[in-house]
Structure formats: structure tokens, C-alpha cells
């Protein structure tokens, strides 16, 4: 297998092929075309992802998660990637339950190898139906996950993408995001910052 030193993994936390998926794919394509990142996309859409049961099998056995479901296809990608762009739709003012479950299930990776995520680079993107529907809270939740697991959280910086990429779909899904030029600009700002960590 050829090692991909600059693999950027985009994870979409929306159950639909709409605004969030469009935004993550926009980010990946921009990163690949403008800056030469290797890219992979993965979505929770149509996937079977069980809740963490807190059975502590992962802590006791250090062999990963006891659940055997569609998370198995993403564990190796999470290990392989150096960069992450997690994206979520806003549900009830925060990230989707689907993305939260993916994060909870990452506990099994850390139980097996406490440094599995160490010094990787992570950014966050959130798509709300309202302009201020909880995007910053959801982004913060993703950044907290990064920080807790030794991933270096990055944003696009002041004057536009303060915590990460915030987008407004006006509840019009993909079509809404295609028209959200300001939101798409926040994605470009985040990618520009990520490039500084590229080898
Ligand atoms: C259960 C549920 C809760 C939602 N709660 C919010 C919310 O609190 N704030 C908001 O801005 N939009 C909320 N929305 C709207 C979605 O965030 C918005 O339509 C978004 O574009 C969905 O992402 P998608 O385009 O990737 O499907 C909610 C949608 C659903 C289904």
C-alpha cells in the first residue's frame, strides 16, 4: 500500500445527501485541487452505527470495539488519515446524534492505542437551517472531541472562520449551501490553515 502522507478524511454526519455532504465534498475537492491533499469521504448516511454500550470491552481487551457494524470500515481510515474535516448538520442546536455516536465509538481506538490520534490535525464544519442555529456550538463539540483525543484543532482564524466553517442552508439542503458563498469562503479559509501542517 502506498502511504498517503497528507490524507484528509472528510466525515459527513448527515443522514441525507444534502447540504452537509455538499459542504464536506466541497472542502475535500478544494483541498485536493488547490493544495494536492489526498482525500477520502465517508458518510453516516445509510450506515448501521450502533451506540457505544459502555461495556468496557475495549478497555479490558484492547482489541477495538465489541460492536461489529459499519464503523469497521472507518476505523482504519481514521488511523491512516493525518487530517480530519468532520461535518455535521445542526440538530437541536448541536451536532447530529449520528456524528456523536461515531465520536463515542472512537473510544475503542484510544483504549487500544492511547496515541492513535496524537498530533493529527482536525477541523470542523456545521450546517444549520438557521443562520445562528447552533453552528458554533456544534463546531465546539467537534473541536472538544479533537482536543480530548490529542488531535490538534484548527480553524480558519479571525475575520470569518473563527472556530471553523459555519454554513447556512436556509433549510434548502444542497441548493442552500451552493448559494451560501460566505459559508463556502469559511471552508476555504480552514483549508488554507490546514495546508500549513502539510508535509
Ligand atoms: C431533528 C432536526 C433538528 C434540527 N434542529 C436545527 C437547529 O436547532 N438549528 C438549525 O439551524 N437547524 C436545525 N435543523 C435544520 C438542519 O440543520 C438543516 O436543514 C440542515 O441543512 C440539514 O443538513 P443537510 O442539509 O445536510 O441535510 C434541524 C433539522 C432536524 C432534522
Image (spheres, helix red, strand yellow):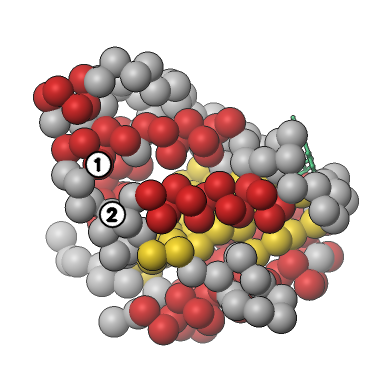
Q: Is residue 110 left or right of residue 191?
A: left
Residue 22 shows in this picture: no
Place residue 185 in its image quadrant.
Answer: bottom right
Labels 1 and 2: the sequence-earlier one: 1
Give the residue pinned by disc 2: 117
Give the residue pinned by disc 1: 110
Residue at 79 percent of width and 72 percent of height: 181
Place residue 98 in its image quadrant.
Answer: top right
In the rendered image, the quadrant that contains the C terminus is bottom left
Which one is in front, 100 or 149?
A: 149
Within 8 Å: ligand 1 and the Cβ of disc 1?
Answer: no
Give the Cα distance between marks 1 and 2.
8 Å
Point out residue 172 in the picture as x, y percentages from the top left corner.
Answer: 85, 48
Point out residue 115 in the picture as x, y percentages from the top left corner.
Answer: 20, 52
> Ligand 1, what quadrant?
top right
Q: Secondary structure at mark 2?
A: loop
Residue at 19 percent of width and 27 percent of height: 59
Place residue 54 in its image quadrant.
Answer: top left
Residue at 80 percent of width and 56 percent of height: 168
Amino acid at each position: 500500500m502506498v502511504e498517503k502522507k497528507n490524507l484528509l478524511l472528510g466525515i459527513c454526519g448527515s443522514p441525507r445527501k444534502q447540504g452537509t455532504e455538499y459542504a464536506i465534498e466541497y472542502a475535500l475537492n478544494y483541498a485536493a485541487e488547490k493544495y494536492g491533499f489526498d482525500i477520502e469521504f465517508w458518510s453516516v448516511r445509510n450506515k448501521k452505527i450502533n451506540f457505544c454500550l459502555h461495556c468496557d470491552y475495549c478497555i479490558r481487551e484492547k482489541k477495538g470495539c465489541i460492536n461489529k457494524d459499519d464503523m469497521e470500515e472507518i476505523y482504519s481510515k481514521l488511523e491512516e488519515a493525518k487530517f480530519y474535516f468532520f461535518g455535521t448538520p445542526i440538530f437541536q442546536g448541536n451536532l447530529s446524534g449520528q456524528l456523536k455516536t461515531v465520536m463515542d465509538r472512537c473510544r475503542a481506538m484510544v483504549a487500544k492505542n492511547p496515541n492513535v490520534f496524537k498530533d493529527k490535525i482536525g477541523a470542523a464544519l456545521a450546517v444549520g437551517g438557521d443562520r445562528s442555529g447552533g453552528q458554533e456550538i456544534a463546531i465546539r463539540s467537534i473541536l472538544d472531541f479533537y482536543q480530548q483525543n490529542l488531535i490538534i484543532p484548527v480553524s480558519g482564524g479571525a475575520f470569518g472562520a473563527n472556530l471553523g466553517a459555519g454554513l447556512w442552508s436556509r433549510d434548502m439542503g444542497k441548493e442552500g449551501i451552493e448559494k451560501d458563498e460566505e459559508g463556502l469562503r469559511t471552508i476555504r479559509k480552514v483549508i488554507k490553515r490546514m495546508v500549513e501542517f502539510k508535509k
